[in-house]
Amino acid sequence: MKKPLENRFYYLDNFVTVVESVRTRYRHLLNPQEQAFVDGFGSLPQASAALLVRMVMRKGGLFRLSKLRYDEIGCAGNAAAALVAAGWIDPQPLLDLDQLFSVLTKTEIIAAFLLLQTNKGARKSEQLALLHAAEGVDGSAARTRSFTDWCPSASDSLLQLSAPVVALCDRLRLMFFGNLYQDWSEFVLSELGIFKYEQVDLSPAAQGFSCRQDLDDYLHLHACRERFYNGEMPHAIVADICAEPYPNTWLEERRSKLLFHIAQHCERIGELSLALRLYADNSRPGARLRAIRVLERCGEPEAAFALAQQAEGQAESEAEQQQLLRVMPRLRRVLGYPKLAKAAAVGIVQHQIQLMPPDSGMSVEAALGQYLAREDAPAVYVENALINSLFGLLFWDAIFTPVPGAFFHPFQSGPADLHSPDFRLRRTAQFDAGFAMLRNGGYKQIILHRFHAKENTQSPFVFWGAIDDELLTLALDCIPAPHLEKCFERILQDIKSNRSGLPDLIQFWPAERRYQMIEVKGPGDRLQDNQIRWLDYFASHDIPVAVYYVQWVGETA
């Protein structure tokens, strides 16, 4: 296959790949008009098909014929003829004033409207406002007209993608990618070798969409999300979002995420009643804690305390437990309840150390690593890279198991349900097999093998640029399997939260086959919540870890 830049029609080939994939896997989810498109696209003349794809991939739906210049297509007018005949583009679209301004230059605008002859120096936005103001005089600007009627002296013409084609191409992209944030550039990045993806079985049994309603619901949620980020009032958007959870789990995750973000916005602008309602009905992690905070702001400490007690009895995560330890004493104090004795803190080794100020550009982590390192005890900056990479390599097969709704297309760095609560449950056998290798010793060989076999393949866990053979060998020789098992179990408890917050450095003593993780804090720096949770976890499971608080010689704390 020619490289994209050598193949002048690479973009057309990529579009055909999407059309044929959808036609093969999801034809039963298309209506008759959409089926006619996917069936008929392949019979178009190459230049016509290429022109349509060029228009689809450009922003906006209105195109001046003079600007559709592509060497491989040739005359755009000739290429457009078959598209007009198919009803996929409109050669005489009706435009309102705003649409007209979007396709005209400032010089053309002045020539088209006598009213603007005395306002040639005004900006386009000011000229548009002036014409809109004139609507109240004769109403002429309010009408829709063809491009030719608006600009009779223009030597150009205008084409518009039909609304059904625009909507269908979004639907095709959704059905292929499983989302609307990936676009046609994914093909090019892959074909150029910039990204390499795991090849996953995309058989019908693993397809993400089981019914047309799933697609309609996704597109509706996407439209609501766009309205929210464009500044529309929250009440109007919430009214258009389904009040009941979707039966499709990954769609429900999108619905709850959008409602959570709307609730946060309402909280910020003081719409506390709506924020509270949205949090109360939301199963998304963090929603219950936000509801407690809103109840406090609303002057309802009793209700906040009752909800916090409920959370204490069945906390959804370590993060929620951590926050409740801060919230409950405050609520007890407000309500006049007696203080409770604090639980004994887990002991974490801490060191206060002074170092000479490093050379410009050297981080505090690098400076401490350089100070601690010995010829027989290397100290390496790894942060989140090492433990996550070991996890990703050991459980590669589990992560890329093609369960329904996880993989939609060949350009996924990980499964779509990675952060779903049932992520592990849906892959129980595969994860059990990985943990069995930790217990029987087979994990070292499989991790090293996959490091080479899967080199630079996209993964949600493996940091290819930060690990090498030497680091992996040191880690596998010095970190006991039970310690790795504890780390991996915690990652699986809450993948979204626990992939981060790991200590900055790790020091190895290969001769003794031992190690220590090291969190580094520079002058004025404090431990973050997710770091504290990892440190407490390590300490409670006898995993060697220490915190170094670094000050520079000559500087006061």
Image (tube, helix red, strand yellow):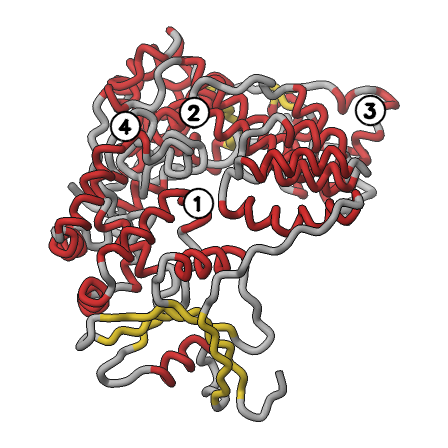
Q: Position of residue 359 (x, y in %)?
A: 45, 87
What residue would you read off at disc 2? 249
Q: Does the image show residue 313?
A: yes
- Mark 4: few/some/many CA within 10 Å (<14, 14-19, 20+): many
Look at discs 2 and 3 and give the one toward the viewer.
2
Q: Along the line of sight, which residue is nearer the eye, 455 or 257?
A: 257
Q: Secondary structure at mark 1?
A: helix
Left or right: where does residue 395 sit relative to residue 332? left
Pick whichever of labels 1 and 3 is earlier in the sequence: 3
Tell me whether the residue at label 3 lies in contact with that at label 4, contact meaning CB atoms closer than 8 angstroms. Answer: no
What is the secondary structure assignment of the residue under circle 3?
A: helix
Work out how far the residue at label 4 is from the one at label 2, CA to CA, in angstroms.
Answer: 13 Å
Which residue sits furthest top?
32
- Vertical arrangement, residue 402 with respect to residue 122, above or below: above
Q: Position of residue 499 (x, y in %)?
A: 40, 51
Label located before the other in sequence (2 or 3): 3
**Disc 1 from disc 3: Cα separation:** 54 Å
- Cβ atoms at labels 2 and 1 below 8 Å apart: no
Q: Give the vertical position of 513 relative to 201 (above or below).
A: below
Residue mark closest to the camera, 3 vs 4: 4
Q: Mark 3 sits on what residue?
A: 135
Amino acid type, label 2: Thr
The residue furthest bottom is: 554
Q: Residue furthest right?
A: 137
User: Residue at coordinates 57% horizontally, 71% vertically from top-left?
Assistant: 525
Q: Which residue is mark 4?
A: 403
